[in-house]
């Protein structure tokens, strides 16, 4: 089979790497890819949001399966465009992708199906939103309705912050049309967990649990990022929570989607928070998580390709996934300044040396090769995943590898999976 992976992040490198191992995969293309995907397949210089050019490429090259990594092309309807040309693509249609692309749509669906989530109000008038905040209990969480590169959520601890956030989103066009409508919801405290499900419209198959670290700096300080690290399995997850999750969230969600005439086929990843009052949904994502995918796929022993195909064909109920029982820890190496301004074009050294370590996978994100030299080309540069018998073991290995890699202004968190590793040790002793 000829496979096209759309995107250029660490998630896409991990997907391409995993699909490459399938005995059914003949050629792998990545659009636009990065220096890592170029080593396992062929990069195609088409940006992930140039939908027409991607359709043309898939047609001309007789691509058998396209796997869409990021949310933007899904929200823009790439899968619908492919379907219209009888091309197979993994991911939800435009109307199904609204579950991530519109927080208001997701909230309405959850309300109708009584899926536990934060109490929320939606606003399309900024004065009304400000007036609401005058009476609200702080902190409140303010969310742009649409996609905002993971930056559309602000936790406002006082009315002044709330007022300025509302003004930026709704009046000053900080997120363009994505911020014209907003959701203001109650602040929930607890620990977060990411669950990934392959959903074929009627049925689903869960992947193992994972946790990511969204804040830029150690100790969960600094701004939210796309994710600075992840680990799997999640230390805060267990079979009791999983049973609750399936009963209170997954089944009602699929029912609600079908009732609304939406046949969701693709990867659904609810972001969850475990509060003292039980599980709550923070958001729904309609694609693989980044960097969760880089932690999950090295643990997946089964071939990913038939699983993606079964999702498209509506036969996921006949599938199962075999997992490596070892833990995985992923540390993201970023350019200093990310998620704000950062420099690119810094030569990267030590990649080969780090790759020699046992059970290490180095996934590229913002990298490119210029005259034979791999250099930085983005905010998140590399994701280093290590497997180990315990989270502590995997964590040590991931940081050993990270220490061997160098580029100017490299920044990474030193506390990925730290609490989990400590808990793991306590549990074992
Ligand atoms: P979202 O894009 O909706 O997942 O939000 C991004 C991050 O903001 C989440 O992963 C949480 O860390 C935080 N967050 C979102 N909603 C809430 C909430 N209601 N209470 C507390 N934190 C939240
Ligand atoms: N790791 C968070 C996300 O992919 O949305």
Image (cartoon, rainbow, N blue to C red):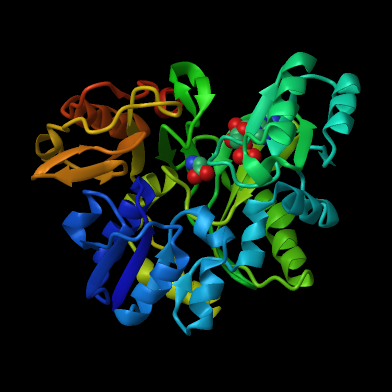
Residue 409, relative to residue 25: is it above or below? Answer: above
Q: Residue at x 78, y 34 (%)?
A: 184
| Image quadrant occupied by the N terminus | bottom left
Residue 85 position, x and y percent, is 48, 83
Nearest the viewer among 279 and 422 is 279
Q: Residue at x 59, y 68 (%)?
A: 93
Q: From this viewpoint, is residue 303 visible?
A: no
Residue 162, relative to residue 44: is it above or below? Answer: above
Residue 414, relative to residue 290: is it above or below? Answer: above
| Image quadrant occupied by the C terminus | top left
Left or right placement of residue 34 versus residue 322 in this view: left
**Which quadrant of the structure image shows residue 371?**
top left
Q: Residue at x 36, y 41 (%)?
A: 327
Left or right placement of residue 9 versus residue 243 in this view: left
For the image, the number of numbered tags is 0
Q: From this viewpoint, is residue 142 visible?
A: yes
Residue 236 position, x and y percent, is 55, 35
Q: Residue at x 24, y 55 (%)?
A: 37
Residue 310 position, x and y percent, is 47, 76
Residue 346 position, x and y percent, is 20, 30
Specify the farthest residue to the front.
172
């Amino acid at each position: 089979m000829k496979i096209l992976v759309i995107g250029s992040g660490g998630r896409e490198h991990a997907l391409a790497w995993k699909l490459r191992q399938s005995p059914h995969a003949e050629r792998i293309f990545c659009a636009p890819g990065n220096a890592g995907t170029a080593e396992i397949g062929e990069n195609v210089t088409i940006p992930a949001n140039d939908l027409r050019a991607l359709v043309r490429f898939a047609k001309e090259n007789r691509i058998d399966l396209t796997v869409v990594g990021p949310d933007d092309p899904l929200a823009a309807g790439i899968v619908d465009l492919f379907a219209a040309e009888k091309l197979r693509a993994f991911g939800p249609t435009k109307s199904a992708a609204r579950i991530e692309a519109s927080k208001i749509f997701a909230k309405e669906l959850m309300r109708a199906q009584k899926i536990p989530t934060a109490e929320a109000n939606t606003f399309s008038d900024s004065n009304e939103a400000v007036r609401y905040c005058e009476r609200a209990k702080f902190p409140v969480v303010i969310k742009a309705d649409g996609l905002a590169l993971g930056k559309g959520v602000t936790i406002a601890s006082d009315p002044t912050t709330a007022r300025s956030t509302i003004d930026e989103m709704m009046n000053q066009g900080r997120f363009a049309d994505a911020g014209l409508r907003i959701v203001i919801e109650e602040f929930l405290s607890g620990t977060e967990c990411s669950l990934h499900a392959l959903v074929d419209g009627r049925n689903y198959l869960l992947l193992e649990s994972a946790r990511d670290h969204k804040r830029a700096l150690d100790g969960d300080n600094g701004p939210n990022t796309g994710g600075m690290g992840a680990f799997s399995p999640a230390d805060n997850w267990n079979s009791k929570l999983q049973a609750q999750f399936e009963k209170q969230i997954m089944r009602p969600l699929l029912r609600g989607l079908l009732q609304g005439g939406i046949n969701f086929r693709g990867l659904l990843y609810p972001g969850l928070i475990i509060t003292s009052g039980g599980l709550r949904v923070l958001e729904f994502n309609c694609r693989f998580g980044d960097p969760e995918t880089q932690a999950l796929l090295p643990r997946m022993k089964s071939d990913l390709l038939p699983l993606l195909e079964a999702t498209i064909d509506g036969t996921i109920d006949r599938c199962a996934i075999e997992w490596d029982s070892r833990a995985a820890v992923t540390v993201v190496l970023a350019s200093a300044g990310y998620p704000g301004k950062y420099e690119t074009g810094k030569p990267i050294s030590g990649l080969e040396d780090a790759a020699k370590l046992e059970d290490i996978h180095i996934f590229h994100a913002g990298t490119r090769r210029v005259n034979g030299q791999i250099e930085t080309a983005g905010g998140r540069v590399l994701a280093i995943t290590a497997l180990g018998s315990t989270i502590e073991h995997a964590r040590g290995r991931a940081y050993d590898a990270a220490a061997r890699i160098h580029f100017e202004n490299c920044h990474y968190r030193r506390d990925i999976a730290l609490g989990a590793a400590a808990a793991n040790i306590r549990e074992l002793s």
